[in-house]
Image (cartoon, rainbow, N blue to C red):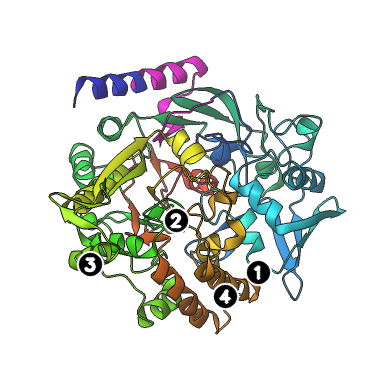
């Protein structure tokens, strides 16, 4: 461990000790979660504006969702809402809210809050968050039926409306804000500090490297009998400083749940602290992440505006090497754009059987033949054409070694094949705030097909021509940042419109998926790489009840909005 890493770890230990001492909360009553990034604006809790405003504890402890998708059962677990109903063509949804819910200041949570927050998204064009943009695109109007009932009328049929917007399908959900505090504020500039929510924890303090949340013993859920108070009196989200630092913190019991680590690091932690577990008790340890990894390609930038050049890169990439080197064998090569969950098998099988699945290994010669067919000639190490070297910059989020190691492998593969590829690491806020949404890249490592965990449209619908905007304008909801357009994209979009209108489970959908996928395969606006896996160490020294394959009440991704379930399941180890 180098000096800088030791310094970060020591600083983290000091923060924990001083924070606990200041409020007299014992370590055994505190659960400490790892942050893999710096909190860029710790004084701002306006989740509707760009930046990290929610995943350092706000939507895990303070802001509760209406529903939570249960990855184990595929059902929507009710939370702030109790149920919903849809009309026959899925253009109207009526949500019933739970009685007795309160904001932490004692004000009632009701339909007025839902109406108010949704109307912000519908009417304020300055609001740029993905969730707000999705609501704006889908909802025609929202109506209060009574204090505990809200009706949504949509612009077009959408059987997935509830799970997409209010069900924590992927990472978060559209969060409801308190009307009595937000009313009269400018949604684009309001910092919402101090923040409040309906959750069982209230905000105590935050800095660039940690946030502290303390239990509200007057929480509505305990008063109404919805759920007991969670056992932890305090929840801390702490920037660990990287893999070596988080390993030291886990081994010394100063961290209870850590972000992703490599196999070697995990085994080293376990050797020092046998109380540390993962999703699986044995190799490969890691849980499957729903956001399969891929290489985004800006289809407006030459020479990558040529589908054959994009296809060439797909041939050159050796996915099995990414699995073995970047992931140490803990994941699998992607056959399609989809996460390879059992519920997605009918759609994946349809694509593969139609001949559009990707092999794990490379076919470099086929890729080079496509490049040469476009007039490029190998001149020493690289291809050239009209005096120009074939080159590409690949942007990558520097927040995780998983990301940077994957791109290092791809860069080496492209270099060997004759493309002068370079990795361009950028800070997390820049990556998500400037690079991806505005198309400020040639290629980029990401997971923008993320969405489909039980049906195909959520991922495939992100690439329709309806979401194409010029480079320099923000892509709505990070959809089609590749700016994929033209006849093939239009044909694809027409099939997507057909799928979008069909009810979940329609027998025709797998065939339509395969029909649409031929256009993705021919044009390669993005290149599927590997399935994502997260090896997340969880420490049982102070807390038991962590989600595992043997205790599958939901998945273990504790930076998501469903973390309320995790915290409520934790029990003191002694």
Q: Is residue 15 in sight in this rendering?
A: yes
What label does residue 159 carry, if any? 1
Q: Are marks 2 and 1 in contact (CB under 8 Å)?
A: no
Q: Which residue is mark 2?
A: 299
> Residue 22 lies in magenta, yes or no?
yes
Q: Is residue 479 left or right of residue 154?
A: left
Residue drawn where x is 32% and y is 59% of the image: 529
Q: Nearer the viewer, mark 1 or mark 3?
A: 3
What label does residue 495 carry, if any? 4
Q: Nearer the viewer, mark 4 or mark 2?
A: 2
> Which label's residue is closer to the chain start, 2 or 1?
1
Task: Give the distance between the C-alpha atoms of the residues marked 3 and 2, in whole angstroms.
Answer: 20 Å
> Residue 173 lies in magenta, yes or no?
no
Residue drawn where x is 48% and y is 79% of the image: 515
Task: Give the distance between the C-alpha atoms of the residues marked 1 and 3, in whole angstroms.
Answer: 44 Å
Q: Nearer the viewer, mark 1 or mark 4?
A: 4
What label does residue 199 carry, if any? none
Q: Quarter of the image holding residue 7?
A: top left
- The percent position of residue 151, horizontal first and vertical second, equals 80, 59
- The percent position of residue 349, horizontal first and vertical second, equals 39, 78
Task: Give the distance between the C-alpha atoms of the residues marked 1 and 4, in whole angstroms.
Answer: 16 Å
The residue nearer to you, when weighing 275 against 45, is 45
The residue nearer to you, when weighing 236 against 559, is 559
Q: Is residue 422 left or right of residue 79?
A: left
Q: Which residues are magenta?
A: 13-41
Q: Nearer the viewer, mark 4 or mark 3?
A: 3
Helix, strand or loop status at disc 2: loop
């Amino acid at each position: 461990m180098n000096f800088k890493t030791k310094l970060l770890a020591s600083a983290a230990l000091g923060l924990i000790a001083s924070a606990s001492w200041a409020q007299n909360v014992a370590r055994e009553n505190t659960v400490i979660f790892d942050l893999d990034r710096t909190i860029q604006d710790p004084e701002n809790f306006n989740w509707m504006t760009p930046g990290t405003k929610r995943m350092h504890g706000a939507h895990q402890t303070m802001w509760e969702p209406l529903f939570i998708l249960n990855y184990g059962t595929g059902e929507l677990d009710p939370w702030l809402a109790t149920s919903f109903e849809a009309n026959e063509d899925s253009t109207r949804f009526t949500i019933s809210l739970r009685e007795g819910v309160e904001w932490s200041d004692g004000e009632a949570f009701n339909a007025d809050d839902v109406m108010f927050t949704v109307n912000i998204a519908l009417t304020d064009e300055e609001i740029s968050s993905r969730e707000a943009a999705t609501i704006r695109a889908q909802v025609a109007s929202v109506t209060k039926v009574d204090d505990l009932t809200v009706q949504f009328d949509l612009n077009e049929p959408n059987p997935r409306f509830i799970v997409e917007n209010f069900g924590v399908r992927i990472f978060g959900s559209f969060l409801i804000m308190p009307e009595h505090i937000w009313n009269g504020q400018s949604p684009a500039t309001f910092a919402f500090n101090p923040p409040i929510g309906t959750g069982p924890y209230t905000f105590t303090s935050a800095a660039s490297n940690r946030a502290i949340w303390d239990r509200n013993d007057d929480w509505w859920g305990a008063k109404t009998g919805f759920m007991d108070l969670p056992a932890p009196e305090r929840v801390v989200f702490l920037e660990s400083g990287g893999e070596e630092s988080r390993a030291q913190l886990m081994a010394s019991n100063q961290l209870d749940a850590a972000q992703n680590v490599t196999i070697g690091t995990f085994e080293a932690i376990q050797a020092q602290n046998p109380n540390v577990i993962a999703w699986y008790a044995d190799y490969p340890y890691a849980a499957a992440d729903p956001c399969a990894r891929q290489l985004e390609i800006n289809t407006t930038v030459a020479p990558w505006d040529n589908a054959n050049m994009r296809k060439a890169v797909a041939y050159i990439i050796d996915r099995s090497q990414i699995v073995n080197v970047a992931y140490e064998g803990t994941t699998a090569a992607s056959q399609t754009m989809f996460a390879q969950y059992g519920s997605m098998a009918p759609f994946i099988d349809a694509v593969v059987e139609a001949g559009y699945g990707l092999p794990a290994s490379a076919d470099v010669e086929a890729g080079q033949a496509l490049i040469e067919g476009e007039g490029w000639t190998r001149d020493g190490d690289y291809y050239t054409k009209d005096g120009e070297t074939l080159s590409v910059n690949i942007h990558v989020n520097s927040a995780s070694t998983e990301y940077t190691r994957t791109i290092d492998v791809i860069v080496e593969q492209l270099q060997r094949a004759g493309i002068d590829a370079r990795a361009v690491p950028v800070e997390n806020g820049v990556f998500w705030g400037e690079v991806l949404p505005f198309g400020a890249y040639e290629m980029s490592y990401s997971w923008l097909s993320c969405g489909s965990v039980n049906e195909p449209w959520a991922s495939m619908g992100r690439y329709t021509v309806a979401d194409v905007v010029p480079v320099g304008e923000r892509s709505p909801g990070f959809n089609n940042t590749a700016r994929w357009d033209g006849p093939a994209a239009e044909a694809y979009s027409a099939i997507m419109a057909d799928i979008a209108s069909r009810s979940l489970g329609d027998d025709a959908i797998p065939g339509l998926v395969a029909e649409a996928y031929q256009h993705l395969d021919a044009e390669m606006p993005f290149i599927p790489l590997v399935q994502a896996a997260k090896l997340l160490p969880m420490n049982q020294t102070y807390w038991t009840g962590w989600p595992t394959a043997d205790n599958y009440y939901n998945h273990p991704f504790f930076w998501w909005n469903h973390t309320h379930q995790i915290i409520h399941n934790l029990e003191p180890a002694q």
